[in-house]
């Protein structure tokens, strides 16, 4: 997936944080459940957490990553801030941050209590979202675009689980555990909620 912004690297070392181990575990779990399916060699979807409560910086999976076992240290990038108007992302790490870093940043900025954002692609959830009263963005927009960020913010409100039309879901949580478990629960409910 192409990155639609320019990354300005403040330093070229991958972030160091003990909570990255938790993020790795969630990457593996999402991968195994098929919530981040592999397309042309890289996984669709991206997972992030906010390491410092009162800052908008976050640690996110790198772009073009295969979210599998044995993720190396350079699989994660710290995004310090995003300049949406100029489409510049300030980051530290050795790889490009996920192409969808912009909506992560805007959600962290708007929602102080949210410390983890997990985004996946899942056909079962897309199909049943409306039946299950999950908020869905009003229009489909290109992956990684500024327009997509706007669509997400339009319906964000206080929701913890939303769907981007014809694209994927976003699960939010006060911590990784709650974002991840929410996504898994919604996925299971979508599988069980078959049409009659
Ligand atoms: Zn996506």
Image: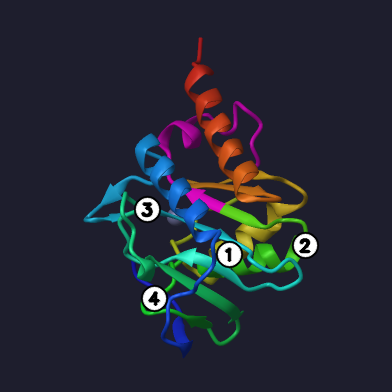
Give SS at disc 2: loop
The residue to which callout 2 is attached is: 112
The residue to which callout 1 is attached is: 103
Whether pointer 3 and pointer 1 mark residues with C-beta atoms closer than 8 Å, the reply is: no
Mark pair 2, 1: CA separation: 15 Å
Question: In percent of the image, x 31 and y 54: which residue is there?
Answer: 70
In the image, the segment drawn in magenta is: 118-135
Which comes before the other along the chain, label 3 or label 1?
3
The residue to which callout 4 is attached is: 96
Residue 160 in picture, x, y percent from top left: 69, 45
Which comes before the other along the chain, label 4 or label 2?
4
Which comes before the other along the chain, label 3 or label 2?
3
Q: Quadrant of the N terminus?
A: bottom left
CB of residue at label 3: within 8 Å of ligand 1?
Answer: yes
- Report the image quarter containing ligand 1: bottom left
Is residue 114 placed above or below 57 in the rendered structure?
above
Give SS at disc 4: loop
Tell me the quarter of the picture where residue 42 sits: bottom left
Question: In percent of the image, x 22 and y 56: which residue is there?
Answer: 41
Q: Residues within 10 Å of mark 4 (few under 14, many from 20)?
A: many
The residue to which callout 3 is attached is: 44
User: Of discs 2 and 1, which sits in the foreground?
Assistant: 2
Give SS at disc 1: helix
């Amino acid at each position: 997936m192409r990155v639609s912004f320019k990354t300005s690297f403040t330093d070229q070392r991958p972030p160091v944080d003990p909570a990255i181990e938790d993020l790795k575990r969630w990457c593996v779990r999402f991968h195994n459940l098929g919530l981040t399916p592999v397309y042309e060699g890289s996984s669709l979807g991206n997972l992030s957490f906010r390491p410092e409560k009162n800052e908008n910086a976050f640690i996110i999976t790198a772009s073009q990553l295969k979210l599998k076992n044995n993720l190396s240290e350079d699989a994660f990038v710290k995004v310090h801030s995003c300049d949406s108007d100029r489409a510049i992302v300030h980051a530290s790490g050795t790889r490009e941050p996920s192409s969808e870093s912009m909506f992560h940043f805007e959600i962290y900025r708007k929602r102080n209590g949210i410390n983890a954002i997990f985004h996946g692609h899942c056909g079962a959830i897309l199909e049943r979202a409306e039946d299950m009263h999950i908020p869905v963005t009003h229009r489909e927009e290109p992956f990684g675009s500024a327009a997509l960020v706007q669509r997400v913010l339009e319906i964000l409100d206080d929701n913890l689980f939303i769907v981007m039309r014809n694209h994927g879901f976003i699960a939010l949580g006060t911590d990784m555990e709650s974002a991840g478990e929410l996504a898994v629960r919604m996925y299971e409910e979508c599988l069980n909620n078959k049409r009659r």
